[in-house]
Image (cartoon, rainbow, N blue to C red):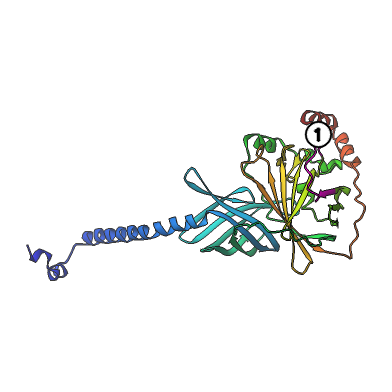
Amino acid sequence: MAQLFNPGWRTKRVPSPKFNRRTKLIEQSKLSLLGFLIALPLATNCLAQLEGEWYLTINHVAERLGVISFERREGELHAFVDGGPADFVMKGNRLEMDVDYRNGGGRLLSRHFTGTLNVDSLSGTLVDEELGSTGTWVAERFGAQTALPAAPVDISGIWSRISAGMEKVFLDYTDSAQAAVDDYTYLDDPGLRCNSPGLVRISGWPYPMEIIQNDRQVTILYESFREVRRIYMDGRDIPENFPTSAMGYSTGHWEGSTLVVETSLLKPNFVDQAGQPVSGNAKIVERIVLSEDGQNLRSLLTLHDPENYKRPIVRFRQWRKTPERTIMEYDCDSYPFYRGLQLEGKLDEFLERVRQRH
């Protein structure tokens, strides 16, 4: 029996081709299993490291900001970008992810992200295959927020938008919101009728705004739709039975040098031109930060609207100080819109749709 396990005996034996193939398959299977067993804890560990929120910066034509959230639901890890679901695959410490967005011309596109996880950071490259454009990206884990004493800074002046956020289109809808999105047509866009499209959209439009600031109030004059917004800084409560409006009722306070603004009493409106609804019970929280040189303003806007979305929606805004600019008259004429409907024989149908929705 000892000879049967003598290595010399095994090397002298000439196996058949069939034996060779079987042995090779067995060895390959062993290697595959070994690789799987090694990769499994690595992949599991990397997935665990992903959980939480990440601050995203991409350079794709222009700098854009966003928030990636990795959240476990029913035992599986899901990715969300600015509150909307995103498909992702994790292989070891390598991440691939697809994120839809809408460009300035209203075109629906997608960015394909590839990158590497390094403990508290993610980084890599991205490509928009349809446009043939490429870019880079980096994400850093959100740090714990601590309460800071008020340290107001001067944000007054005229500001022009230099970048919007990721502009994620498909969001984490409730059933009623999904039905509203499916029913939406471009005719429902209030801007076509020269009605204000609301705070979320106006804050991301390319028109300038002027901020006037004192200890009791921050006033924002938007060129878009000639909107005026008052942020009360005197600690008041939201009054009862106050009418709703497109810009809502806003109160603010300072956390360190960050202006925190809370807005409610919003009229029902839309997140963007894709028709994602904003309910009358929605609340918006903005965190506005001035750069160290005082020339750039950055805002993280979070929409809390559980009637329509299973998780908050995030929108980043960035502006540059432009004292040479002037707030111009916003000239909007709804006549071409209504006249066009009349010529197409759709005016009565449109007016009936408006009555049903309101």
Q: Total marks drawn?
A: 1
> Residue beneath label 1, please?
241
> Is residue 239 shown in magenta?
yes
Quarter residue 340 falls in: top right
- Residue at image x 66%, y 36%? 307
Q: Main secondary structure of the magenta part?
A: loop
- Residue at image x 84%, y 52%? 216
Q: Please tell me whether residue 156 is drawn above or below residue 84 in the rendered image.
A: below
> Is residue 241 shown in magenta?
yes
Disc 1 residue crowd, few under 14, some 14–19, many 20+, Cα 10 Å:
few
Q: Is residue 47 left or right of residue 256?
A: left
- Residue at image x 35%, y 58%? 37
**Magenta-tinted stretch:** 229-244
Depth order, front residue of 216/43: 216
Q: Is residue 57 left or right of residue 12?
A: right
Depth order, front residue of 35/13: 35
Quarter residue 17 falls in: bottom left
Q: Secondary structure at mark 1?
A: loop
Residue 133 x/y as whole percent: 66, 62
**In which quadrant is the N terminus drawn?**
bottom left
Residue 165 x/y as whole percent: 70, 56
Q: Please tell me whether residue 27 is drawn above or below residue 11 in the rendered image.
A: above
Q: Is residue 235 left or right of residue 131?
A: right
Residue 160 x/y as whole percent: 82, 60
Instruction: Report the amino acid beneath label 1.
Output: Asn
**Can residue 155 be seen at all in this image of the molecule?**
yes
Residue 320 x/y as whole percent: 79, 63
